[in-house]
């Protein structure tokens, strides 16, 4: 396994936190600094949101800054947009990403476009906290990882932390940004009370001080020479595990954690593939028309001569997420599938 | 309620400003679109939803607002924008797609924004209700003055956003008014075929908020009803659904001949502006000479705005890529 995240940019810390806890620290810190920051959404008041990123917020700041809403996503996201246009900095809890289906107009046609359509007159300093991901038999309407659906729309910035250190730094960056930002976390990485023991590799040393991580800067977790593995969120952990397994077979894998999906750090990916000549992109989003294809296209467009072998994608097959354990396990990306994809392009020439 | 003379003069002037503006845009719209109509052609391209007949709905409500308040309009925004005092030169330039437009040509006529007067639009039915309520909430939770007024059409009350936002606005007692312009048609579908209640303010019972229907497309009556709704919002007593009977004298957009309406129905439509003009004369608010002078002055202002738009440059094409992010 890789070493814990390098905390040198913000001082050392011995505190090992879950991602939910780390994200919440950033929320509370920003709320203490700026009275215009508030949390709004379903179940944010008493239980601090289904993913725990607002635990304790209502106790400290009161019900006017941790606003429980009715189950009306179109309504409360619209209201948050208006508050943002009036100069406040709302943090909207969307809970499961799958719920975008009932409120997408407000996100796609309003929040993402208002700055542009107004010629820059109105800003939209709004952050959405969104949980993604399957792997726990919650079926097709509560398990999706639809990064590409949001990344496709111009005007939205998207971060996908893979660990607690990044979760906090990226949350600070989102709240401080004057645009619509999505903080998307995979449920399996959060450290949720209802999903078993926390994923150890997602927990990290987190400084108590505030720090932010810039948008558009991927992290190279592990350097390698034979193949580049690109992941985001949970799939970073699949990549790291696969890199360990590949090392045992004498294959040196470089692992890149996107951290920020929009803007995308194409430079770091290209530099890595220029070195290794091989690429496997690992994503829990649906295979077609998504993040994996975009990353591969951006390399080929720039210089197709870098390829020593065809790029590979390990992603969710183009079917809804099934319920039954063997069915879902068949579909989910994992380290073994990454290893198999790498070996398929490492065959002797 | 006796409407004071200054308010009536202001309402008439803003109504004719909207009317003259729409007249001028109507004429410009057909340039380059004959003999074969194609909305992509000419100096004013795209869909064009004009406000002919609906001017009283804007002036009767917005006469009560001040600079701290906020106004959201929908896809038919000209009369509301003009009554709000949106910069007319820059609004005209936006319709012509010019660099000097409110949004530098990125928005167009369904997406007019003038932050200097707290005005915004949204082109999708009922989409602006939440944002307007959010601006009301921002004022309330920060103890800032001001209310929010959102305009929708009667058909928009059948959108889910209407239900969700009115429920929350009432639950939280937001200083918010939902103005519904009942022009009787959602594009081609009459209200009686789309809406289970005759009058949308009756839905206020479902949200525990106030509602009032105003008949007659009459600026003075609208002014009186809006006075109550605005005062209620300013007192912190929550939202009002204010539905205003009005007339859409043209089709849904230019190029829609409204063939789904009978000759008899079209013939019975009253233009509210000459009606109001006569009343102002009868009531001695204006004499004929004063009216003619006001009309000449407003016509000149509108003509100047159209000239400003025509004389302005188009944006550099690559400006299309600017302003995505703040």
Image: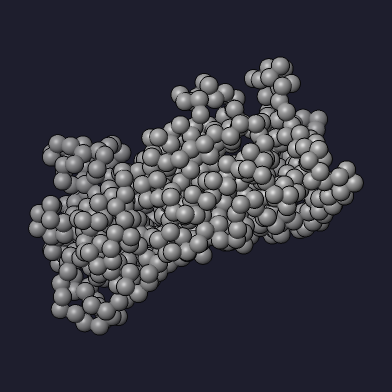
Percent of width and height locating residue A109: 49, 47
The location of residue A284, given as percent across then percent down, is 27, 49
B204 and A285: which one is in front?
Answer: B204
**Front residue of this view, candidates B25 and B319:** B25
Residue sitting at 79 percent across and 56 percent down? Answer: B308
Question: In the image, B218: left or right of A312?
Answer: right
Residue name at image x 68 percent, y 55 percent: B85
Number of numbered discs on residues: 0
Using residue B297 as the reference point, say whether residue B132 is left or right of it. Answer: left
Q: Residue at x 46, y 46 (%)?
A: B239
Nearest the eye: A21 or B266: B266
User: What colouring does the structure picture have?
Assistant: one colour
Q: Nearer the viewer, residue B76 or B226?
A: B226
Please, which residue is most extreme toward the left here?
A197
**B201 left or right, relative to B250:** left
In x, y percent, where is residue B277?
79, 39
Q: Is residue A348 above or below residue B143?
A: above
The image shows residue B299 at horizontal and vertical percentages of 83, 48
For the question of whether residue B95 can be seen, the reply is no
Is residue A289 rendered to the left or right of residue B264?
left
Identify the residue at horizontal 81%, vertical 50% (top origin): B298
Position of B30 relative to A70 (above/below): above
Q: Which quadrant of the figure has residue A12? A: bottom left
Q: Residue furthest right?
A: B289
């Amino acid at each position: 396994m890789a070493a814990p995240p390098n905390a040198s940019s913000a001082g050392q810390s011995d505190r090992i936190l879950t991602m939910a806890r780390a994200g919440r620290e950033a929320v509370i810190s920003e709320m203490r600094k700026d009275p215009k920051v508030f949390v709004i959404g379903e179940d944010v008041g008493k239980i601090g949101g289904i993913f725990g990123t607002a635990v304790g917020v209502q106790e400290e700041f009161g019900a006017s800054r941790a606003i429980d809403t009715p189950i009306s996503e179109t309504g409360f996201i619209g209201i948050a947009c208006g508050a943002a246009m009036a100069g406040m900095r709302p943090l909207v809890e969307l809970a499961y990403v799958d719920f975008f289906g009932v409120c997408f107009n407000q996100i796609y046609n309003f929040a993402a476009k208002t700055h542009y359509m107004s010629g820059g007159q109105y800003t939209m300093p709004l952050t959405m906290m969104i949980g993604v991901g399957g792997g726990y038999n919650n079926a097709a309407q509560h398990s999706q990882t639809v990064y590409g659906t949001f990344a496709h729309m111009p005007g939205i910035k998207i971060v996908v932390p893979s660990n607690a250190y990044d979760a906090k730094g990226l949350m600070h960056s989102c709240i401080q940004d004057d645009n619509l930002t999505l903080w998307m976390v995979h449920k399996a990485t959060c450290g949720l009370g209802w999903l078993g023991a926390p994923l150890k590799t997602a927990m990290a040393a987190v400084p108590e001080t505030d720090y932010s991580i810039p948008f558009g800067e991927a992290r190279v977790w592990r350097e390698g020479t034979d193949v580049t593995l690109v992941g985001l969120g949970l799939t970073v952990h699949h990549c790291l595990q696969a890199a360990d397994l590949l090392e045992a077979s004498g294959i040196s894998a470089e692992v890149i954690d996107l951290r920020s999906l929009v803007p995308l750090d194409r430079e770091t990916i290209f530099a890595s593939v220029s070195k290794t000549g091989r690429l496997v992109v690992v994503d829990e989003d649906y295979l077609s028309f998504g993040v994996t294809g975009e990353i591969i296209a951006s390399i080929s467009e720039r210089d197709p001569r870098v390829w020593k072998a065809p790029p590979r994608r390990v992603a969710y097959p183009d079917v809804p997420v099934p319920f039954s354990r063997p069915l879902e396990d068949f579909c989910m990306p994992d380290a073994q599938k990454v290893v198999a994809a790498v070996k398929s392009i490492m065959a002797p020439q | 309620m006796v409407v004071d003379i200054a308010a009536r003069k202001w309402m008439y002037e803003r109504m004719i400003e909207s009317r003259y503006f729409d007249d001028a845009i109507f004429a410009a719209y057909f340039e380059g679109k004959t003999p074969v109509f194609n909305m992509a052609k000419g100096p004013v391209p795209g869909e064009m939803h004009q406000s002919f007949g609906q001017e009283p709905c804007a002036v009767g409500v917005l006469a009560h607002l001040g600079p701290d308040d906020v106004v959201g309009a929908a896809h038919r925004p000209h009369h509301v924008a003009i009554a709000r005092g949106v910069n007319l030169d820059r609004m005209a330039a936006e319709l012509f797609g010019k660099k000097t437009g409110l949004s530098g040509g990125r928005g167009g006529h369904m997406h007019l924004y003038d932050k200097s007067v707290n005005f915004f639009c949204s082109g999708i039915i009922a989409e602006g209700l939440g944002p307007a309520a959010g601006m009301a909430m921002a004022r309330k939770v920060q103890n800032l003055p001001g209310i929010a007024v959102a305009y929708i059409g009667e058909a928009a009350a059948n959108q889910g956003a209407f239900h969700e936002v009115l429920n929350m606005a009432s639950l939280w007692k937001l200083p918010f008014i939902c103005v519904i312009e009942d022009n009787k048609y959602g594009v081609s579908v009459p209200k009686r075929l789309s809406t289970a209640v005759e009058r949308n303010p009756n839905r206020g019972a479902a949200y525990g908020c106030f509602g009032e229907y105003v008949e007659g497309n009459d600026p003075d009556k609208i002014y009186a009803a809006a006075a109550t709704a605005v005062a209620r919002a300013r007192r912190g007593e929550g939202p009002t659904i204010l539905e205003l009977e009005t007339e859409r004298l043209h089709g849904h957009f230019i190029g829609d001949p409204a063939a789904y309406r009978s000759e008899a129905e079209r013939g019975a439509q009253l233009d509210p502006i000459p009606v109001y003009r006569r009343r102002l004369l009868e009531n001695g608010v204006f004499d004929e000479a004063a009216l003619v002078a006001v009309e000449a002055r407003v016509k000149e202002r509108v003509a100047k705005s159209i000239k400003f738009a025509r004389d302005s440059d188009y944006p550099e094409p690559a400006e299309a890529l600017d302003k995505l992010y703040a």
